[in-house]
């Protein structure tokens, strides 16, 4: 199975961070950690997989390939196709990337780090997510905003809300699988969800809406169609909020980390990322330092 990462530069170019789901500088405390995160994530994936591909736009290619020299096996420059979408719809770049895959794949976010290959049960699964979530607090206010202000809500979402007022969802830090027809159907539904509500996005928190049309919709669809899903983490339904931030046991006891959302603002976490990159990939680390010092990135 191939690994895919995607970098849509537009959400990273906003003038400031607005909330925990904002993607200016990738959501990191400083741009240096965004660059170091992408570098460490890519290099660790390459340590275990032969095919690690990138889908990006021209600015992303200039940054990740021409400046950071990241060793992707294939680069597809096509995310200019989604530049007409709102800056805060950062999951659109991921959805577009999912939609153009025609063979089994795992999409890995640029803030996910592995120190061990995923097991074959994951590689062979029809559908793959990082983990399943249950009853995460931030879902309730944005779902209320969606129901009160948007004019189009997919039937599977309405059905799920009637079926279970406790919100079940998934984390898409890792996402993909072998069931390509279903994944394409899901992507089409997600784009429809967004496109039919473009005129009403000013009425809701757009940053949090990403979790609805990407992660919650996916859960609604797999529940409706009774699809088999494999999670790469074992703590299913424990409400981990996408935050896996233990670095002290790397690489012997800790094999996976995903410091999402508010964890990216932690100086401790940022320092862990920088230290790990400096220790394991000094050439890449000092290359980033040189680029920063010379104001080339």
Image (spheres, rainbow, N blue to C red):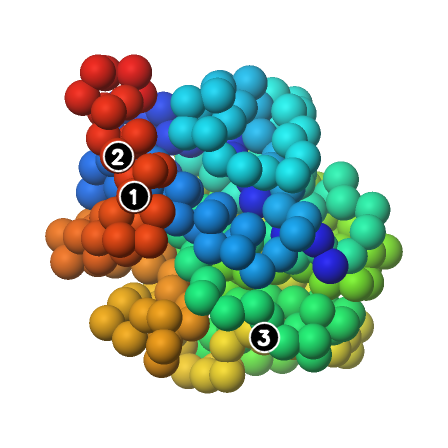
What residue is pinned by disc 3?
A: 231
What residue is pinned by disc 2?
A: 286
Q: Residues within 10 Å of mark 1 (few under 14, many from 20)?
A: few
In the rendered image, is residue 28 in sight?
no
Percent position (x, y) of residue 254? Answer: 36, 75
Percent position (x, y) of residue 270? Answer: 21, 51
On the rendered structure, is 45 left or right of 2?
A: left
- C-alpha gap between disc 2 and disc 3: 35 Å
The disc, 1 or 3, on the residue closer to the chain's N-terminal end is: 3
On screen, 39 above or below 296?
A: below
Q: If the image is split into quadrants, where does the C terminus sit? A: top left
The disc, 2 or 3, on the residue closer to the chain's N-terminal end is: 3
The quarter of the displayed image where residue 58 is located: top right
Task: Kindly report which numbered mark, 1 or 3, lies closer to the viewer in this rendering.
Answer: 1
Q: Secondary structure at mark 2?
A: helix
The disc placed on residue 282 is 1
Percent position (x, y) of residue 255? Answer: 42, 72
Task: Pick the residue in front: 87 or 105.
Answer: 105
Task: Pick the residue in front: 133 or 245.
Answer: 245
Task: Pick the residue in front: 83 or 107.
Answer: 107
On the rendered structure, is 28 left or right of 96?
A: left
């Amino acid at each position: 199975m191939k690994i895919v990462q995607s970098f849509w530069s537009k959400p990273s170019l906003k003038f400031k961070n607005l909330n925990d789901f904002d993607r200016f500088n990738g959501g990191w405390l400083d741009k240096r950690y965004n660059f170091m995160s992408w570098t460490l994530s890519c290099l660790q994936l390459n340590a275990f997989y032969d095919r690690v591909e990138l889908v990006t736009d021209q600015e992303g290619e200039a940054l990740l390939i021409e400046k950071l020299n990241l060793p992707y096996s294939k680069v597809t420059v096509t995310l200019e196709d989604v530049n007409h979408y709102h800056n805060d719809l950062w999951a659109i770049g991921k959805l577009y990337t999912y939609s153009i895959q025609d063979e089994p794949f795992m999409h890995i976010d640029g803030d996910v780090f592995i120190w061990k290959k995923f097991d074959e049960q994951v590689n062979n699964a029809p559908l793959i997510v990082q983990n399943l979530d249950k009853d995460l607090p931030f879902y309730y206010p944005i779902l209320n905003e969606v129901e009160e202000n948007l004019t189009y809500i997919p039937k599977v979402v309405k059905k799920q809300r009637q079926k279970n007022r406790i919100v079940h969802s998934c984390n898409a830090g890792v996402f993909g699988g072998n069931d390509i027809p279903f994944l394409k159907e899901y992507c089409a539904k997600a784009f429809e969800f967004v496109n039919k509500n473009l005129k009403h996005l000013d009425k809701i928190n757009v940053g949090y809406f990403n979790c609805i049309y990407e992660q919650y919709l996916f859960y609604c669809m797999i529940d409706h169609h009774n699809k088999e899903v494999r999670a790469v983490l074992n703590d299913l339904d424990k409400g981990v909020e996408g935050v896996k931030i233990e670095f002290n046991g790397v690489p012997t006891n800790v094999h996976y980390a995903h410091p999402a959302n508010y964890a990216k603002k932690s100086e401790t976490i940022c320092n862990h990322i920088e230290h790990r990159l400096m220790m394991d990939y000094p050439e890449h680390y000092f290359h980033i330092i040189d680029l920063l010092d010379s104001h080339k990135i």
